[in-house]
Amino acid sequence: MQVPYLVDLIASLVFAISGALAAYGKLLYKDIFGVAFTAFITATGGGTLRDIILGVHPLTWVADGNYLIAIFSGVLLTIFFKGYIKKIPKTLFLLDTIGVALYTILGVQKSLAHDVNPIAAVILGMVSAVFGGVLRDTLLNEIPLIFKKEIYATACIAGAFLFVLLNYYGADRNFNFFASIALIIIIRVIAVRYKIALPKLEE
């Protein structure tokens, strides 16, 4: 099993847990369908939009049942162990940060494999990462993080750009993969820790 494929499955599981936890916190009736549906949308939203833009058919999660197994494993883990998961400091932030970092770089990598131009690959990497969260937050009647002052999509773009740059200069693929993921996580953590935000546009 290749590393990117395994990481993609892990990312799906992480985003599913993120979506399920968010649903537990917001849904009036915390039935299993509502929790599972929110987790599913969170885990597949970004990748689905990316695949549609790239013309990938069938969609990744449709073609490979392992993605559905990973997603619903995340749902079950949340249902049965949510008490333990919630004890991890800033659980939702941590899961979301890991998820967007993984999805960004996987999205860039897949886009480049379909011979898109580097700028489009960066954008598609960002879309892969944030769109599932946008759908999750919209379903739960929350303002999506991408529209808040936090440095969120910008961190994804920075990591995606680093991946494209190192790829252009022929850096080791595994080093590039994990270095770019690490950059996104570091930027997100520092930005939240020190309350760093992009400048606000004047009205």
Image: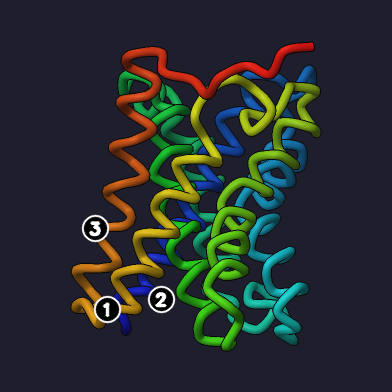
Judging from the image, the colouring scheme is rainbow
Where is 198 relative to 48, above or below? Answer: above
Q: Secondary structure at mark 1?
A: loop
Determine crowd level at label 1: few under 14, some 14-19, many 20+ residues with C-alpha closer than 10 A: few
Crowding at label 3, few (<14), some or many (≥20) Cα neighbours within 10 Å?
A: some
Using residue 96 as the reference point, say whether residue 188 is left or right of it.
left
Circle nearer the viewer, 2 or 3: 3
Q: Which residue is mark 1?
A: 169
Q: Quadrant of the N terminus?
A: bottom left
For mark 3, give the secondary structure. helix
x 47%, y 28%: residue: 92
Q: Residue at x 61, y 81 (%)?
A: 116
Q: Report the residue at 51% width, 80% height from top.
A: 112
Q: Which mark is residue 36?
A: none
Percent position of residue 24, x then y: 63, 25
Pick whichever, 110 or 42, lies toward us: 110
> Is 190 positioned to the left or the right of 145 in the image?
left
Return the residue at label 3: 179
Q: Looking at the picture, how far across and down is residue 71, in whole percent?
A: 56, 57
Rendering quarter of residue 140: top right
Give the distance between the C-alpha atoms of the residues marked 1 and 2, in whole angstroms.
23 Å
Please, what is the three-letter code of the amino acid marked with disc 3?
Answer: Ala
> For mark 2, what is the residue?
5
Residue 32 visible to an observer of this rendering: no
- Lower sequence index among marks 2 and 3: 2
